[in-house]
Image (cartoon, rainbow, N blue to C red):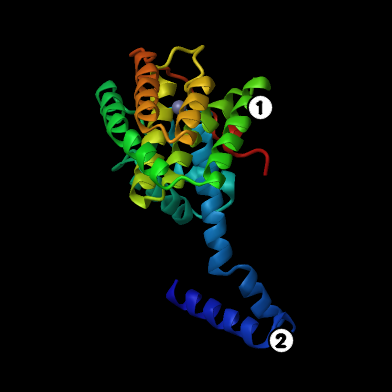
Amino acid sequence: MGGDVHVVASSQADVVKGGRAGLTQASRRLVSQDKVSRERFHDEIYERIYIAILEHRLAPGTKLGEEQLARIFEVSRARVREVLSRLSHEQVVQLFPQRGAFVAKPSPEEAMDVFETRRLLEPAVVGRLIDHLTKDKVARLRQHLELELDARRREDRRAVVRLSGEFHVLLATLCGNSAYHRMMRELTTLTCLIIFLYDAPTAMSCRADEHAEIVDAIARRDLGMACQLMTEHLNHIESSLILDSLDQEIDLAAVLGDSR
Ligand SMILES: [Zn+2]
């Protein structure tokens, strides 16, 4: 691995010094397989699994078999393990010794913990965003609301679920606090899994009109109203949960293997 990186580094130095024309065929091949592209593919596998979870195509508790994923993505099991380890750091995947990796399956207690934390964190996010608000940030939020509305019009449930979660992450991104952003990303993904497990099957997670009201209050810099609407919004989501779980077999190849 270390030698690999060294070769790649010298190849990249060649590119800087002599341009692509100066490369031999062998070094070109090395460049094409360099660490950067491997990282990119690593990210692609990560994103594919992550989005599948956000879009409710991978149920909580689904086993993520190393061998099967390695086959689906045509990579080594070591590469799959790296991705699973990253997802487990973000609480999206749970790793069990001897048993392997599973999509996280938050318990009802953990679900309540997540909402309790979100009720503390999100008013702070909204407050910081109002303090650092710009026209561009408001435009960005309105643009996101349009995407949500469009997905609802198309009745694209997967996109609706994903975009609903991403709305909350976007607030945290725009507020400019990287720790808030990291926490929101994790809490939003867990909420997605919680909604999958405990929401009424007909529910559509976040209500779009509530997001629009929150954005209006933020745009008016009305901190009190924005925080109140956010808290009510989180209460609405939590109160729509029912403590039942869905058990279904997921075909990993069907969910992750197509559209490449
Ligand atoms: Zn929401």
Q: Which amino acid does label 2 sit on?
A: Gly
Q: Where is residue 33 in the image (x, y as percent from the top left)?
A: 60, 68
Q: Position of residue 127 (x, y in %)?
A: 35, 39
Of the numbered discs 2 and 1, the one sitting upstream in the chain is 2
Give the side of residue 158 with respect to residue 205, left or right. Answer: right
What residue occupies the far right of the structure in this picture? 21
Residue on which the image places disc 1: 150
Q: In which quarter of the image is residue 221?
A: top left
Q: Which amino acid does label 1 sit on?
A: Asp
Tags 2 and 1 in contact by the CB under 8 Å rule?
A: no
Whether residue 114 is visible, yes or no, is: yes
In front of the other: 168 or 156: 168
Q: Quadrant of residue 147?
A: top right
Ligand 1, by image quadrant, is top left
Quarter of the picture containing the C terminus is top right
> What number is the disc on residue 36?
none
> What number is the disc on residue 22?
2
Q: What's the residue at 44%, 22% (across, down)? A: 196
Q: What's the residue at 51%, 40% (across, down)? A: 49
Give the side of residue 145 with respect to residue 218, left or right. Answer: right
